[in-house]
Amino acid sequence: MKITVFTSNQPRHIHLINKLSTIAKTVYAVQECNTVFPGKVKDFFDNSPVMKDYFERVMQSEKNIFGNIDFVSSNVRTLSLKSGDLNNVSMDVLSEALKSDFYIVFGSSFIKGDLIEFLVNNRAINIHMGISPYYRGSSCNFWAAYDGNINFVGATIHMLSKGLDSGQMLYHALPKLDYLEAFDLGMSAVKSAHESLVERIKMDEIGKFVPVAQDKSLEIRYTRNKDFNDEIALSYLRSLPCKEQVYDKLANRDLSIFLEPYVG
């Protein structure tokens, strides 16, 4: 089996690549790279003291759950790009990676043109870190926690579409019930998404899910990168939920509102 994944270069992205490598003969990993020191090095977000504090906590949580940045497994072929360059790469360059059994998108830039046409036609799967259709856009799990809706922290495994995070849904993946630190909560949701998808591909179950259209009338928030700023980050840092609050919210999740929920 061959799997192609369009992703990035943080520890969580490398974790998915290496998990997929355990079930595939070959993994083609197209990685769009950002700094691995957000908040310290200006890149995707600003490098203000507030952002430095916020992302240091994110990085520590990512390290807690996924370890450090690392090399990929020996059966992984990689193509490294600067973030945002994917749409400028020709289909000829990608041709070797476009002959796989499964195509997965997790943390890439917004894909357009011939590539999105190909991926949609070949039933590519997207991992959206957020519970659609309730939270859509960017940093969805942050905004769910910011709103006090810890019960809406999770991931949506859905069919890739030409619109942003608007494809038909297969299932939701949720963080396990535990006394989690606030920042570990979101990373736990990422791990649940990875493990559920790899497990369901391995067991030949992923194709048995019936895709369900998103009901946009249920949307709570749609957010963009520009919505996350120093003021918002500082407000959240000053009111972080404790582990007991996280546990209570997770314990009282109404699983009936989620699609085929996987709790990992």
Image (cartoon, rainbow, N blue to C red):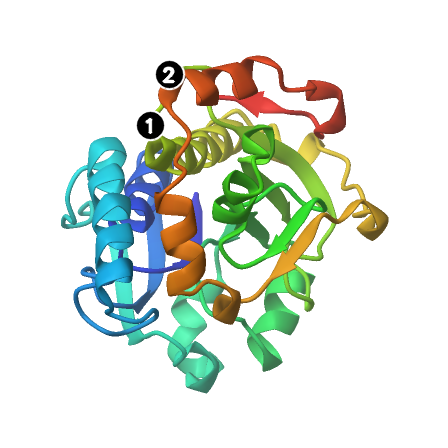
Q: Amino acid at mark 1?
A: Glu
Q: Residues within 10 Å of mark 1 (few under 14, many from 20)?
A: some
Q: Which mark is residue 85?
A: none
Is 192 drawn above or below residue 236 in the view shown? above
The residue depicted at 71 percent of the width and 30 percent of the height is: 259
Q: Amino acid at mark 2?
A: Tyr
- Left or right: where does residue 44 sit relative to residue 250? left
Query: Does residue 207 appear anywhere in the picture?
Result: yes
Residue 169: x, y in percent?
71, 43
In what element is the residue under mark 1?
A: loop
Residue 123: x, y in percent?
65, 54
- Is 182 or 187 nearer to us in this picture? 182
Q: Residues within 10 Å of mark 2 (few under 14, many from 20)?
A: some
The residue depicted at 53 percent of the width and 71 percent of the height is: 110
The residue depicted at 47 percent of the width and 46 percent of the height is: 142
- Is 184 or 66 nearer to us in this picture? 184
- Left or right: where does residue 13 sit relative to residue 63? right
Query: Does residue 101 appear anywhere in the picture?
Result: no
- Left or right: where does residue 61 sit relative to residue 198? left
Residue 58: x, y in percent?
28, 46
Is 185 drawn above or below residue 81 in the view shown? above
Quarter of the figure with residue 242: top left
Residue 187: x, y in percent?
37, 37
What is the C-alpha distance between the residues marked 2 and 1? 7 Å
Quarter of the figure with residue 33: bottom left
In what element is the residue under mark 2?
A: loop
Instruction: Name the residue that disc number 1 marks.
Output: 181
The residue depicted at 29 percent of the width and 42 percent of the height is: 15
Total labels drawn: 2
Q: Which mark is residue 179?
A: 2
Q: Quadrant of the N terminus?
A: top left
